[in-house]
């Protein structure tokens, strides 16, 4: 049994070490019109296999046309249409994904990722994958508001903080920031950028804010209202400073006062008066013990 498991493991290692490279890519990718898209194409590097050539081709009519070539001399963009907006990843071994910027509607087509290796015997191995690129005119989505502050939307006065408005859709996307007013007055416009920056934030900046996003396609969208609270750090410091730091001084007793203790059952209640000193004390300061008659009944 042990020998059988050993042979199976050896066979598995042989496949991993000497198996053929496999390209991984999706069947289709959708990108936003006038936006950017990444077309994934990856493989797991194998021992003994050396990448020697990377090609990206696009279907034009009945024949594919090479638009990108990577060989020993470097990267080459073969078509003027893609210059300045096409990039193929080279920072991660096994990742040859295509980045295509500023998509046009006529970029819709089938793209082929093709990689060539030298195997351990010195022969060439070629693999390819075809991916369909779809380009859509996307309406702007409802924007979301975030902040890079670790405090969230409650920050101390004097801190530099920014609120970011983000939406998806076909660019360009324009943003406007508003601040809510009291007494049902119209919100006031405070910025026409995606980022609302406070440098630094002051108490007067506290309030309710929202942003709007308008894309190339579709109607304007509005975010939820967020409440920004800027705390006055000087008041917080003053409160901490004024907090008591010492214990209250003990009660000073006038030497002319005397105290009596009235015993009611097992519970002693103390009241001020002019009778004898309490049990255990004398006017001279020496300790005395109460003389309790044998006939005293505490029931």
Image (cartoon, helix red, strand yellow):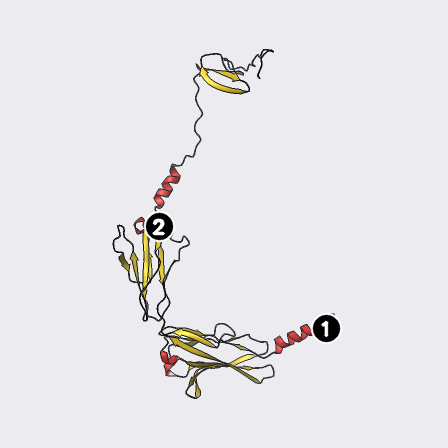
Residue at position x 41%, y 77% in the image: 134
Q: Residue at x 29, y 58 (%)?
A: 178
The reply, left or right, for residue 2 in relation to residue 63 is: right
Q: Which mark is residue 66?
A: none
Q: Residue at x 36, y 45 (%)?
A: 233
Q: Secondary structure at mark 2?
A: strand
Above or below 154: residue 47: below
Depth order, front residue of 83/172: 172
Q: Please tell me whether residue 190 is drawn above or below residue 294 in the rendered image.
A: below
Which residue matches tag 2?
229
Q: Is residue 226 visible?
A: yes
Q: Nearer the viewer, residue 290 or 235?
A: 290
Where is residue 280? Give x, y as percent.
Answer: 54, 16
| Residue 254 location (% of width, % of height) | 43, 17
- Quadrant location of the C terminus in the rendered image: top right
Q: Is residue 241 above or below residue 299?
A: below
Instruction: Say which quarter of the image contains residue 210.
Output: bottom left
Q: Which percent across, then down, holds residue 131?
A: 46, 79
């Amino acid at each position: 049994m042990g020998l059988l498991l050993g042979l199976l493991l050896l066979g598995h290692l042989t496949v991993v070490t000497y198996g053929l490279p496999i390209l991984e890519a999706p069947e289709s990718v959708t990108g936003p019109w006038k936006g950017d898209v990444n077309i994934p194409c990856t493989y797991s590097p194998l021992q003994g296999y050396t990448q020697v050539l990377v090609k990206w081709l696009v279907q034009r009519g009945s024949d594919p046309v090479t638009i990108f070539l990577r060989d020993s001399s470097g990267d080459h963009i073969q078509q003027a249409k893609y210059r300045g907006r096409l990039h193929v990843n080279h920072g991660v071994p096994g990742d040859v994904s295509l980045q295509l910027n500023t998509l046009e509607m006529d970029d819709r087509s089938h793209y082929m990722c093709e990689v060539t290796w030298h195997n351990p015997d010195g022969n060439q191995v070629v693999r390819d994958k075809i991916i369909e690129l779809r380009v859509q005119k996307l309406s702007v989505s409802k924007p979301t508001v975030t902040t890079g502050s670790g405090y969230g939307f409650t920050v101390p006065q004097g801190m530099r903080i920014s609120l970011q408005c983000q939406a998806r859709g076909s660019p360009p996307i324009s943003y406007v920031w508003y601040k809510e007013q009291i007494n049902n007055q119209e919100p006031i416009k405070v910025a026409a950028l995606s980022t609302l920056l406070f440098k630094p934030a002051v108490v007067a900046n506290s309030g309710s804010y929202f942003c709007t996003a308008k894309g190339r396609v579709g109607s304007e969208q509005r975010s939820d209202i967020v409440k920004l609270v800027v705390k006055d750090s000087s008041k917080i410091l003053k409160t901490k400073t004024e907090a008591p730091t010492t214990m209250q001084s003990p009660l000073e007793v006038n030497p002319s006062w005397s105290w009596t203790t009235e015993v009611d059952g097992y519970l002693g209640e103390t009241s001020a008066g002019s009778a004898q000193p309490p049990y255990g004390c004398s006017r001279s300061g020496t300790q005395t013990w109460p003389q309790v008659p044998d006939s005293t009944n505490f029931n």
